[in-house]
Image (spheres, helix red, strand yellow):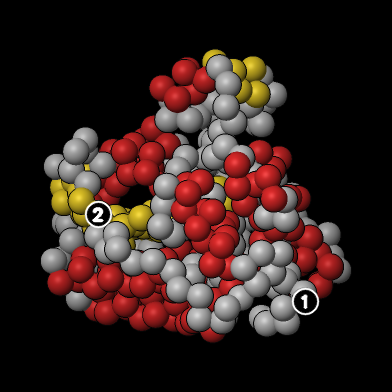
Amino acid sequence: MSMDRRRPSTATATDADAAVQTAAPQAAAHRQPSDAKDSPASVARPKRGVPEGLWLKCDGCGATIYRKEAEEKLNVCPQCGFHWYVSAAKRIEQLLDAGTFEEWDADLKPADPLGFRDKKPYAERIVAEQKRTGLKDAALTGTGMIRARRVACGVTDSSFIMGSMGSVVGERLTRLVERATAGKLPLIIISASGGGARMHEGILSLMQMAKVSAALARYSQAGGLFISVLTNPTMGGVAASFASLGDLCFAEPRALIGFAGPRTIKATIRVELPKGFQTSEFLLEHGFIDRIVPRKDLKSEIARAIDYCGG
Ligand SMILES: [Zn+2]
């Protein structure tokens, strides 16, 4: 990871960018924050993912869709089943029983230990992202009910600095896992992270992978059930740590899931990559994930898995 301040792009960010821009047509629809990070106007832009307006153009099939109709279907295209981005807050709303979510560790805020600066100071970037997304950082964690079963639940949001795992995301998830362990709660983490480590926080970011993974190992030893849900995109250090460690790994259809982006891999190993590489469907076929679950079924599938595993 480069700390050279003249050259802000690290391998981590670049790889994930490349992945999002090139891998799958549906991924391109979900604009990553990095796309606009160099533009002073980016702060004023509306939330990414689902653009404003009454009508949406589907990035899966090209059809023009009435926004309300897509929203009624949990931001899924009624024509082709394309799954649009949903924010962390919306995801919680979709997944948990109404009014049951209680946020944990809401007061954790990112620090800027390196005084990092690329096109703009990290401290300023954080404030702008917080204002734009309404989140303190890229993860939302807490407890709630799924069809009357109490769970510990965490969600990452790719619209906040690519959903990358800085110290706040790592700490919130670690505390979530530890509370799930102490409270003997099933644990659900929904990943939507186009980035892995957050370069702006240097080693403090990189160590979060090991920290969350160690907490998950203790949770597992205590007999906990961890259901990891991978959504578009789940890349980098998030994919390489907690997102891949589920007792059950579910994925939304046609999600982009991988470590480095396909362009980087191709440039490194110099072979043609298989068709559909790094999609949910490809990974299911190769045993990396257990089940592809359309968004409309996610709540009932998780509830069913909890019951099946005696949670
Ligand atoms: Zn469509």
Q: Is residue 72 left or right of residue 6?
A: left
Q: Secondary structure at mark 1?
A: loop
Q: Is residue 133 left or right of residue 233?
A: left
Q: Is residue 19 visible?
A: no
Q: Position of residue 66 (x, y in %)?
A: 54, 15
Q: Circle 1 is placed at which residue position? A: 6
| Residue at image location 16% in from the left, 47% down from the top | 149
Quadrant housing residue 34: bottom right
Q: Is the N terminus in the top left, top right, bottom left or bottom right quadrant?
A: bottom right
Q: Circle 2 is placed at which residue position? A: 103
Asked if 60 appears above or below 266 in the picture, the reply is: above
Q: Is residue 219 left or right of residue 246?
A: left
> Mark 1 or mark 2, which is nearer the start of the sequence?
1
Q: Position of residue 92 (x, y in %)?
A: 33, 44
| Residue at image location 54% in from the left, 76% down from the top | 201
Q: Amino acid at mark 1?
A: Arg
| Residue at image location 42% in from the left, 37% down from the top | 295
Asked if 304 appears above or below 237 in the picture, the reply is: above
Quadrant housing residue 301: top left
Q: Is residue 58 visible?
A: yes
Q: Residues within 10 Å of mark 2 (few under 14, many from 20)?
A: some
Q: Position of residue 287 (x, y in %)?
A: 52, 59
